[in-house]
Image (cartoon, rainbow, N blue to C red):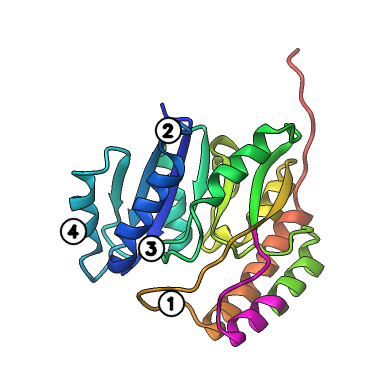
Amino acid sequence: MSELSVVVPVYNERDNIAPLVAEIVAALRGRVDFEIVYVDDASSDDSRDVLRRLKDTTPELRVIGHLRQCGQSTAIRNGVKAARGAWIATLDGDGQNDPADIPRLLAIRDAGASDAIRLFAGWRVKRQDSGSKRWASKWANAIRSRLLRDATPDTGCGIKLFERAAFLDLPYFDHMHRYLPALMQRAGWQVQSVPVNHRPRSAGVSKYNNLNRALVGIADLRGVAWLIRRSRRSDVQEL
């Protein structure tokens, strides 16, 4: 069993795969026992062939493929379910997250952080996206924070470090990856936001736009707020 599993969901990211895998290996090999779990969400390009070829030269790499496109949350969840590590690091497949931040997150976890913290969430303090995306993200984060009170400045950042068992205990729904801090807090765990690097996309195109995120986000926010209101937790003891 690996100590850490790096889960990367991808859809039509063939030109970003090999550079990102190389960066993950450079950041982690010799530092921690790890594996890389790529989840191909039924790409229509040759992303899956690129991944198969990389397996020949990267022993840490495992590849899972969806038979039909299911979305990012399902890809992340299936990657976590297949993972062998007790802790999971996630990265977006577009290369905008910096794998060099993973050792920093691990170091913060191991440097006396509270055992109650089960999610270390990346925080893009210098986001390298278009002005419209930064503006939309700012307002979405403000609305989400006011409604859910999750005290997290950037839930949309793809780089996160969390305990596998805690994640798999959360309620699953499409787009849940955008609400992990609130869901972890609902489960009784603490969350720590950590400033991380963010880079411009070097290849491929974004799979999201501001309108489709906004339309989906309204329904999701209402659903997550309902889950939080209806949650009941209690400490238990063996009798």
Q: Amino acid at mark 1?
A: Ser
Circles 3 and 2: CB atoms closer than 8 Å: no
Category of crowding for the residue at label 1, using alpha-carbon neighbours closer than 10 angstroms: few (below 14), some (14–19), many (at least 20): few
In the figure, 48 relative to 165: above or below? below
Q: Amino acid at mark 2?
A: Gly
* Residue 210, image quadrant: bottom right
Q: Which residue is mark 2?
A: 30
Q: Earlier in the sequence, mark 4 or mark 3?
A: 4
Label 2, secondary structure: give it.
loop
Q: Amino acid at mark 3?
A: Cys
Find the distance from the CA under tag 1 to the CA under tag 4. 21 Å
Find the distance from the CA under tag 4 to the CA under tag 2. 28 Å
Say which of marks 3 and 2 sits in front.
2
In the figure, 109 relative to 48: above or below? above
- Label of residue 70 in the image: 3
Q: Which residue is mark 1?
A: 206
Between 226 and 71, the one nearer to me in the picture:
71
Image point (43%, 48%), residue name: 7
Q: Earlier in the sequence, mark 4 or mark 2?
A: 2
Q: Which residue is mark 4?
A: 49
Q: Which residues are the magenta region? A: 123-138
Residue 106 is situated, as x and y percent measured from the top left of the image, at: 59, 39
Find the distance from the CA under tag 3 to the CA under tag 2. 34 Å
Circles 4 and 2: CB atoms closer than 8 Å: no
Between 172 and 122, the one nearer to me in the picture:
122
Find the distance from the CA under tag 4 to the CA under tag 3. 19 Å
Residue 26 is situated, as x and y percent measured from the top left of the image, at: 40, 46
Horizontal side of residue 74 vs 133, given as left or right:
left
Horizontal side of residue 117 vs 146, given as left or right:
left
Q: Earlier in the sequence, mark 3 or mark 1?
A: 3
Image point (45%, 62%), residue name: 72
Category of crowding for the residue at label 2, using alpha-carbon neighbours closer than 10 angstroms: few (below 14), some (14–19), many (at least 20): few
